[in-house]
Amino acid sequence: MQSELPVHIGCRLAAEDVLQRDAIGAQSDRALAGQTVSSITMLGIYAGVAHAARDIAVGAAARRSTAPPAAVRALVSDIETNLYTLRATAAAALANADELNDDLTGDLDERGRRMMVPFQCAKLAVNWLAQSVVNDCLTVVGGAAYGAAHPLSRLYRDVRAGWFMQPYTWARVDGRTARRRACAAGGRRISQPMSGSAGASGPGGLRPEAFWPVSRCFLLC
């Protein structure tokens, strides 16, 4: 993260490698494409944390002298399911970003929105699922996992770093109320979007930017 704009002196770039943006201070959704590309690979960090936790938990259960009880087997099945869902969600967002990355022929504002929406949806899903996987792994391993020397104690801490930068904040605090308001509105605009033109309509004609003033990228009802 940076607090000031960098100044580049003597840095030469070919004209075709420069994506022209609007004037300083102008709001444009085309910038969402660059923000997506610069951050989307971080989904792999939390996918890796979840996978590492899974390996530790399964290994610990396999080393026990008795066969795992039914409750542990069921919990490991949940871990595998959540890990698969996490990977599939992240992979879909990455594939979408790859597909749109080199396409500069159409509406660049719409391109930015089409890249950012799946990324933010995937980020939220990965945040939820990775933490759920690690929590379940601690249950499988037991109290030893809470010791400072145990690798799961570090993963338990690290997986929560994904929540430091949320797609939105206030809506998550009272998400059910926000979603009920959005659905009750029947597509009427609750609050103005931060900037940019309206994106593609969701189910029932609802537009994501109508509901989330902090992020235009969600429709959660």
Image (cartoon, grey):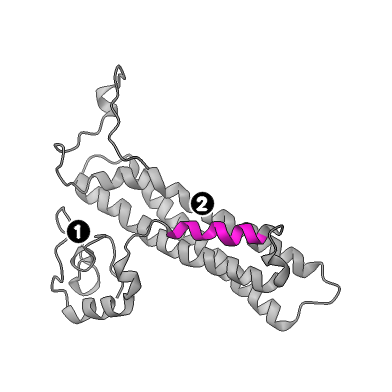
Residue 176 appearing in the image:
yes
Query: In the rendered structure, are the residues bearing label 1 and label 2 in contact, judged by CB atoms less than 8 Å apart?
Result: no
Q: Residues within 10 Å of mark 2 (few under 14, many from 20)?
A: some
Identify the magenta region: 152-163
Q: Secondary structure at mark 2?
A: helix
Q: Which mark is residue 44?
A: 2
Residue 9 in picture, x, y percent from top left: 29, 19
**Residue that appears at 43% across and 51% down:** 94
Left or right: 103, with 46 as reference point: left
Task: Measure how far apart labels 1 and 2 are at the Cα level.
Answer: 27 Å
Q: Which mark is residue 38?
A: none
- Residue lying furthest top in this view? 10
Q: Residues within 10 Å of mark 1 (few under 14, many from 20)?
A: some
| Above or below: residue 65 compared with residue 26 | below
Amino acid type of the residue that numbered disc 2 sits on in the rendered structure: Gly
**Residue that appears at 30% across and 24% down:** 8
Residue 74 in picture, x, y percent from top left: 65, 79
Residue 188 in picture, x, y percent from top left: 13, 74
Residue 98 appearing in the image:
no
Left or right: 76, with 25 as reference point: right
Residue 23 colored in magenta in the image: no
Q: Secondary structure at mark 1?
A: loop
Q: Mostly what secondary structure, the magenta segment?
A: helix
Upstream in the sequence, badge 1 or badge 2? Answer: 2
Residue that label 1 marks:
199
- Residue lying furthest right in this view? 65
Left or right: 164, with 187 as reference point: right
Q: Quadrant of the N terminus?
A: top left
Residue 44 in picture, x, y percent from top left: 51, 51
**Residue that appears at 41% across and 59% down:** 123
Amino acid type of the residue that numbered disc 1 sits on in the rendered structure: Gly
Left or right: 202, with 73 as reference point: left
